[in-house]
Amino acid sequence: MVLLADVVATSAAVAATRSRNAKTSAIADLLSRLDGAEVNPATALLAGELPGGRAGVGWSALSALDVEPASEPALTVTDVAAAVDELRSIRGSGSARRRADALGDLLGRATAREQEFLVRILGGELRQGALEGVVIEAVAAAAGVPTEPVRRAFMLSGQLPVTAEEALRGGEPALAAFHLRVGRPVRPMLASPADDLDSALSGDVSVEYKLDGARIQVHRDGDEVHVYTRTLREITSAVPELVDLVRGLDCRSIVLDGETLALDDSGRPRPFQETMGRFGAQNPREELLHPYFFDCLHLDGADLLDLPLRRRLDALERAAPRHRIPAALSPTAERAAELLDEALAAGHEGVMVKDLDSPYAAGRRGRAWRKVKPEHTLDLVVLAAEWGHGRRRGRLSNLHLGARDPDGGPPIMVGKTFKGLTDELLAWQTAEFLRRETGRDAHTVHVVPDLVVEVELDGVQTSTRYPGGVALRFARVLRYRPDKDAASADTVEAVRAMLPRG
């Protein structure tokens, strides 16, 4: 029987070291001591997540509680999972009071250290996704299997606790049993930045538009269609035009990866916020979304993930030829440069360069997919904000920005900015930050690190001012990215890679 105290101690040990091997070893040691029923909730907790997902508990509810801690640890990980399930089930009249009572009961059974851990995890402060890669390696070590089968099973299941259960229960054969299931989203493949187009054009590649849209994954089985975001959130009911379009394709079953965006009357992309506004809408709005697909992962009963991209593109051409993203296969350097110019002239961000021999590999920013953009931009996590002055008095303005730690630690601060913030954005972020507040001093409000903001910058420079050892130069806010979570933010390594060479 594993106690919550064991998870808390392991989490503290992981936070206390910079060594990825030490983090992996500490988590693997705890995983190896779990019995079957404990693996799922313990894996979630170790990854900084609630067992079963969010429980509808905000910082306001947590900050209002003042519960005397238990003197000795007694809570098990299965106790915590059951309590979270109870919180999740509370609905209807008087639910706020009943939820507060249930929270008080859970925290009253926890020691002071366990209370601190539970409050942070219930409030989302640990839900960064940064530990994902470390936990995958730890699961592999605890199960005595290579890392790659664990990573692949996670890609196909989308659930790390479920993947850990199978790895520890049945090893490689159990992991090999995971397959693409139409209707269950697959974690998306990601791209890494390229310095320029010439450096990205290595080998036999496809060059395609990089749209200023939102990532979508579409699943169809007969007449049943599901649409998911980059973070695997289902948005089917909010995008009926996409559902109707996919139902009209000449196939029985299909899984497509792509982007969608709203266009104006001239065919140019509308502001990104208008596209994202559709994803949260309760009812369809006037702005129609246009899909552009760039990959096909399944077609009429055949899974295509492990086939080279050129074969997946053949399938895409058969199934959805009128909805492919503009692209050129095996282009000359001159044609690739023309395509980049065309994409920019049409109002898009740049181009993607993709290895035509590469399989679909989710969750990693390898060199198989490279993104080429003329502007320097980064997706960073908001850590805190300072109260403004002058016309910004009463608004949270100067953002503290963090990059993702690839070794599973909390985001690493790399700079600040107050530029690019409109009055509308200042009002929005002030309200959002106060809802996410975890603490403050006279000038600064610290927040749950789960909001991703895209910033444009002139470059970076070495600096001892910030923990990342670098500082952003002339950073300005372009937009918030509600389609991304903190696990999708750029790493501190990506920021350091922008340092001048020589």
Image (cartoon, grey):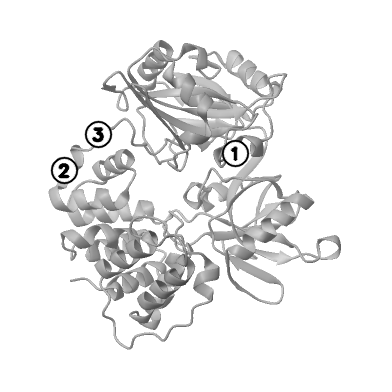
Give, as a three-letter code, the residue at label 1: Met
Give, as a three-letter code, the residue at label 2: Ala
Q: Which mark lies nearer to you, 1 or 2?
A: 1
| Circle 3 SS class | loop
Quick check: can you spot residue 466?
A: no
Q: Most extreme residue toward the front, as rendered?
A: 93
What crowding class fits label 3: few (fewer than 14 Cα within 10 Å), some (14-19), or many (20 or more)? Answer: some
What's the CA distance linking mark 3 and mark 1?
Answer: 30 Å
What's the CA distance linking mark 2 and mark 3?
Answer: 11 Å
For image coordinates 47% across by 67% down, the residue present is: 94
Write down the residue under mark 2: 174
Where is the N terminus found, in terms of image quarters? Answer: bottom left
Q: Most extreme residue toward the bottom, as rendered?
A: 71
| Circle 2 SS class | helix
Q: Earlier in the sequence, mark 2 or mark 3?
A: 2
Horizontal and vertical percent for residue 28? 25, 61
Is disc 2 in contact with disc 3, using a CB cutoff of under 8 Å?
A: no
Image: 479 above or below 10: above
Horizontal and vertical percent for residue 398? 72, 61
Q: Nearer the viewer, residue 253 or 378?
A: 253
For image coordinates 46% across by 43% down, the residue present is: 231
What crowding class fits label 2: few (fewer than 14 Cα within 10 Å), some (14-19), or many (20 or more)? Answer: some
Where is the C terminus found, in terms of image quarters? Answer: top right
Is disc 3 in contact with disc 1, using a CB cutoff of under 8 Å?
A: no
Image: 409 above or below 334: below
Give the number of the disc on residue 276: 1
For image coordinates 45% across by 65% down, the residue present is: 95
Write down the residue under mark 3: 179
| Circle 1 SS class | helix
